[in-house]
Amino acid sequence: MDAPVAQVAVDVPLAHLDRVFDYAVPEALDEAVVPGSRVRVRFAGRLVDGWVLARAATSGVDKLTPVAKSVSAEPVLSPEVAGLCREVADRWAGTFGDVVRLAVPPRHARVEKEAPRAVEIPAVAPPGAGDWAAYDHGTAYVTALAGGNAPRAVWWALPGADWPAQVATAAAATLSAGRGVCVVVPDARDLARVAAAFDVVLPGSYVALTADLGPAERYRRWLAVRRGATRCVLGTRAAAWAPVRDLGLAVCWDDGDDLHKEPRAPYPHVRDVLALRAHREGAGLLVGAYAPSVEAATFVESGWAKPLLAPRAAVRQAAPRIEVAGNDVEQARDPAAATARLPSLAWQAARAALASGAPVLVQVPRTGYQPSLACGHCRTPARCGACAGPLARAGGPAPGCRWCGRPAADWACGACGGQELRAVVVGSRRTAEELGRAFPGTPVRTSDRESIVTTVDAKPALVVATPGAEPVADGGYGAVLLLDGWALLSRADLRAGEEALRRWAAAAALCRPAGEGGRVVVMAEGTVPAVQALVRWDPAWYARREAADRTALAFPPAVRMAAVDGSADAVADLLAAAPLPEGADVLGPVPYGDGERALVRVPREQGRALAAALKVGLAARSARKAAESVRVELDPLTLV
């Protein structure tokens, strides 16, 4: 046996054991224990799972424990993905075991034993630039992909753009050069649109990885990718780890959507995972949206990626007419415009669009009927007397608790004793009810998390939708009304303006161009930068402005920041055990949930050192078996 030593990453969730261990390979398992395969090894007196990272001729340990069992000889963990897992774990202060669980799906023994299908990868002809020609450097980008190069770009999509078709064109250019493609979108609706576009441009040349496939079919498709039967993968968050061979292009659409943020430790973001992967594997990168995130814009500001922007003339031709209901002109004409939920400007835009035979989209921030209530006298938020949860109305006269579900018919305000309630935020269902009365005889449809509508016909109708659930209208909407802008802008969140612009732009992009009568009315203060960016349709300007403001204030992405959550004693213990980089700024701790949160801020170039220091603190606590857990998240979406 030339390499009798197996270097194994043991699957244990302890930071101080996050390293490779050497095991002896028994003669009987020589052919099964291959790099990338799953094994069972004895560790601390019990059998645990492990991943074989390599085979070696010698070890620094004199007496090695033998590998107990080969779970499968299938090399499911490729060297490229294993290296990416290690880098992600180090960057986000996680463990290799936590990350590899995100990258490799659970084994399905029956599927793994199936005979591999003989699949011939069809040749793809280099496509033309198509709609990419409308962007500065768009044609050059597609040409570079077709030439086997690895261009990196951030793409500000034009309003009304058929972005799935453009992604398919970029993928076809990459496949024509013999390289692989990985496309990641936020949710199943976006995935269905992309798959439909690929069926036109690249029929039979891709696999889609989705959570609703079931474990057997998902693992079957994943194995097909790992074995090289296909070079193109579409999917949601987990598809970012798909073991595509010779990756040539990684695509992340709508990177600002919080669905791209992994909810499990160590909480990496798809955009950053794909950026790391593109850098490691020499692949191209395309981060696109109608309004990409500030983090994506910093790729351009640093020179690491190039911008894909359309000339202003093309933007003006494609964009709808965007008006602000609360501006000075409208307030002079309609004094209630600044406070009315549906001011005359919005009502007139909707009426004109319906009269022309086009549907109207109405975006509201929240689902439900009246999802947030307050005292009608003192405006104190209404809370449940049993669990202190927020009260809401689901359609009936009596409110109920959103947390425990108890009715609160006899509610009284704890501050002033008042018993009258008022709606703080009106949800999609109540909005649909109000619009049905305002436009009698017009069909009203709702699309939210409870019932998502995918498409609507080019007929007069009012479509009330929450952000992310807007249906695509055949031929575009005649008008788009963006209600309750204050609810998005007034959130106590660093990203409130950025998120509002992203949601508004996604809805406004579904409207017809101004030349075809398309109008967008936004109910918000016109002097707010996010509103100004929407009116001019210049999200790139907003991203640069926001990045400059955050740099001046030392907020992400200008700095790396870590959130440490737990009990007061546990947070203090971790920070004391972590050798934080010199100059690290510790903010807090402050009350957070049932415990406390401390924020640790360092210059961006010290981000790796911060992650390593927090990993040392976590390892020290796990080594001494600290009773209380601590949650560490680098680059959190929400700071407080």
Image: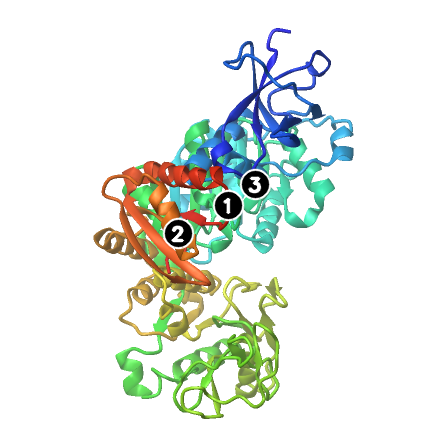
The quadrant the N terminus occupies is top right
Name the quadrant containing residue 379: bottom left
* Mark 2 vs mark 1: in front: 2
Which amino acid does the dot numbered 2 rest on? Val
Image mark for residue 184: none
| In the foreground, 455 or 428 | 428
Using the image as rendered, state which of residue 322 and residue 492 is in the foreground.
Answer: 492
x, y (%) of residue 231? 59, 31
Q: Is residue 39 left or right of residue 509?
A: right
Tell which tag, 2 or 3, sits nearer the viewer. 2
Residue at 61% across, 6% down: 2
- Find the distance from the CA under tag 2 to the CA under tag 1: 17 Å
Query: Can you say whether 226 is above or below 355 in the image?
Result: above
Q: Earlier in the sequence, mark 2 or mark 3?
A: 3
Q: Secondary structure at mark 2?
A: helix
Q: Which residue is mark 1?
A: 265
Mark 2: few, some, or many residues within 10 Å (few <14, many ≥20)? many
For marks 3 and 1, give the CA distance.
9 Å
Secondary element at tag 1: loop
Q: Residue type at mark 3?
A: Leu
Give the numbered dot on residue 571: 2
Residue 102 image label: 3
